[in-house]
Image: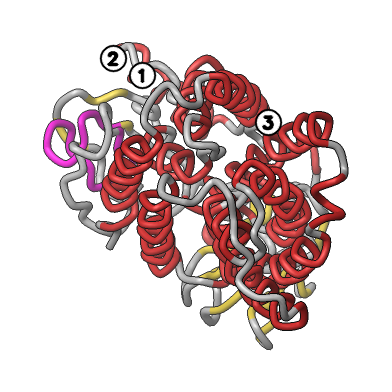
């Protein structure tokens, strides 16, 4: 939707690009356009021609039109405790942007309001009041959005477009990614993130939240499975190392989760691209790790400090990508603490679990987390697919040369990371 701007051609962004409202021309800057102006043509599907220009004034409700809306007096972070349907009175403070109060223009109930914590620009529409004052009047879907939505559905049905986030597709992608990762002893979460953004069209923050949730399920299941096979002996043998890595990773996850919330989206895209490139390099070297580790030093205080520092970095990477960090934890446990590679895999899971829990806690207040909560079925099917793929992959370990496979998967990750995140402007 571009009410006041002339949109750039966008027909190559998706199999079907739909433009809503003014400034869209079907076959020029969108494949199809939907009329959004009140009247008999509201919701009409245009396969050729342009939509009507912006009319200017909104429809009246109880004698009020433009005065029902409030526009941000300044730019900044929008803070409010009000929700749609809340009854308000004229002159009441309903929100703040920094130190600037935002007042209700008239009495009634809130028909629309910007969510708490959103970054708004000066002059942006931030709330709308229904002067009729009946909360039930603002519930459900209004006539205008209903007719626009009907137009969108007609366009999708006419082109035979299927949902990109179906349960079967998410299960299959999750299983395939986990199977490939399982062949080299990893979970594959670093491959899931580009898939969530590029294939399933999630916003980068939504993709990170979903990746964390799927990683949490798969790590918890894998830890229970491995602990049942190996018992608690590895944890006591490398207790100092696990504690150091856990403490460091919790701090790192706390910091990284905050960065995901605060960073500009374009900066976050670039950071995600950079971190995935680093993981691709580490993955390429993963197949060359010695199967029997050698402890770096006998100085236990030094080992604890080094492990904690490594943990901070791993926690930041894990929380910013939504991954368990096994690619980084396993080399540290093998090269720093002398664990054999199989034991290191189990110990890495025990470090990842609390790290992921802290990450979930840090991200849960994000609007992206609330949006991701609406895709619980998608998350569940991808988690089940990931568990299935990881199990099959673990059974096939050794079928393909590990060194060659590590390099091949690293190249795939590198390409997918750069194509998904590297060209964002």
State which mark lies toward you, 1 or 3: 3
Q: Where is residue 104 drawn, in percent x and y?
A: 71, 68
Residue at image position (65%, 49%) is 344
Residue at image position (71%, 43%) is 346
On the picture, is 337 further left or further right than 266?
right
Q: CA distance from mark 2 to mark 3?
A: 27 Å
Q: State yes or no: discs 1 and 2 in contact (Cβ < 8 Å).
A: yes
Instruction: In the rendered view, tell whether residue 33 sits above or below residue 348.
Output: above
Mark 3 secondary-structure assignment:
helix
In the rendered image, residue 20 lying in the magenta stretch gets the answer: yes
Q: Where is residue 14 drawn, in percent x and y?
A: 27, 33
Disc 3 crowd rating (10 Å Cα; few below 14, some 14-19, many 20+) is few
Residue 307, quarter of picture: bottom right
Q: Where is residue 223 drawn, in percent x and y?
A: 76, 38
What numbered label is drawn on residue 420? none
Give the magenta part as a residue range. Answer: 18-33
Q: Which residue is mark 3?
A: 376
Sequence-first tag of 1 and 3: 1
Q: Where is residue 26 drawn, in percent x and y?
A: 18, 32
Q: State yes or no: discs 2 and 3 in contact (Cβ < 8 Å).
A: no
Residue at image position (52%, 14%) is 168
Q: Which residue is mark 2?
A: 159
Q: Which residue is mark 1?
A: 156
**Taking the image as drawn, is residue 89 in sight?**
no
Mark 2 secondary-structure assignment:
helix
On the picture, is 237 further left or further right than 162?
right
Give 402 or 68, whichever is nearer the viewer.
402
Instruction: In the rendered view, tell whether residue 349 sits above or below residue 294.
Output: above
Sequence-first tag of 2 and 3: 2
On the picture, is 309 further left or further right than 364?
left
Quadrant housing the C terminus: bottom left
């Amino acid at each position: 939707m571009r009410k006041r701007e002339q949109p750039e051609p966008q027909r190559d962004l998706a199999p079907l690009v739909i433009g809503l409202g003014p400034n869209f021309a079907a076959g020029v800057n969108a494949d199809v356009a939907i009329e959004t102006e009140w009247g008999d043509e509201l919701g009409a599907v245009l396969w050729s021609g342009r939509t009507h220009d912006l009319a200017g004034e909104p429809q009246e409700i109880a004698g009020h039109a433009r005065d029902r809306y409030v526009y941000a007096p300044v730019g900044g972070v929008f803070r409010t405790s009000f929700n749609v349907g809340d009854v308000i009175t004229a002159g009441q403070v309903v929100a703040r942007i920094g130190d600037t109060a935002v007042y209700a223009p008239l009495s009634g109930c809130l028909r629309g309001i910007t969510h708490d914590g959103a970054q708004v620009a000066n002059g942006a529409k931030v709330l709308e009041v229904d002067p009729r004052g009946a909360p039930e009047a603002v519930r459900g879907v209004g006539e205008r959005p209903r007719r626009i939505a009907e137009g969108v559905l007609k366009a999708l049905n006419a082109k035979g477009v299927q949902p990109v986030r179906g349960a079967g597709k998410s299960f299959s992608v999750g299983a395939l990614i986990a199977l490939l990762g399982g062949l080299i002893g990893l979970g594959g979460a670093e491959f899931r993130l580009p898939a969530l953004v590029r294939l399933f069209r999630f916003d980068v923050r939504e993709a990170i939240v979903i990746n964390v949730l799927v990683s949490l399920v798969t790590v918890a299941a894998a830890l229970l499975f491995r602990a049942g096979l190996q018992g608690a002996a590895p944890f006591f043998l490398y207790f100092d190392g696990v504690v150091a890595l856990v403490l460091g990773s919790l701090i790192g996850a706390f910091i990284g989760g905050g960065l995901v919330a605060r960073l500009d989206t374009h900066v976050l895209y670039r950071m995600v691209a950079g971190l995935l490139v680093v993981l691709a390099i580490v993955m390429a070297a993963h197949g060359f790790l010695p199967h029997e580790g050698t402890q770096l030093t006998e100085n236990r205080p030094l080992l604890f400090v080094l492990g904690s520092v490594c943990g901070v970095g791993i926690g930041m990477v894990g929380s910013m990508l939504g991954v368990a960090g096994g690619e980084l934890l396993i080399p540290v446990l093998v090269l720093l603490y002398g664990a054999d590679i199989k034991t290191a895999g189990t110990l890495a899971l025990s470090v990842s679990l609390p790290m992921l829990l802290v990450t979930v806690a840090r991200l849960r207040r994000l609007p992206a987390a609330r949006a991701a909560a609406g895709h619980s079925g998608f998350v569940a099917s991808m988690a089940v697919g990931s568990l299935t793929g990881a199990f099959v992959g673990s059974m096939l370990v050794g079928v393909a040369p590990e060194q060659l496979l590590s390099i091949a998967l690293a190249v795939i990750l590198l390409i997918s990371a750069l194509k998904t995140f590297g060209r964002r402007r």
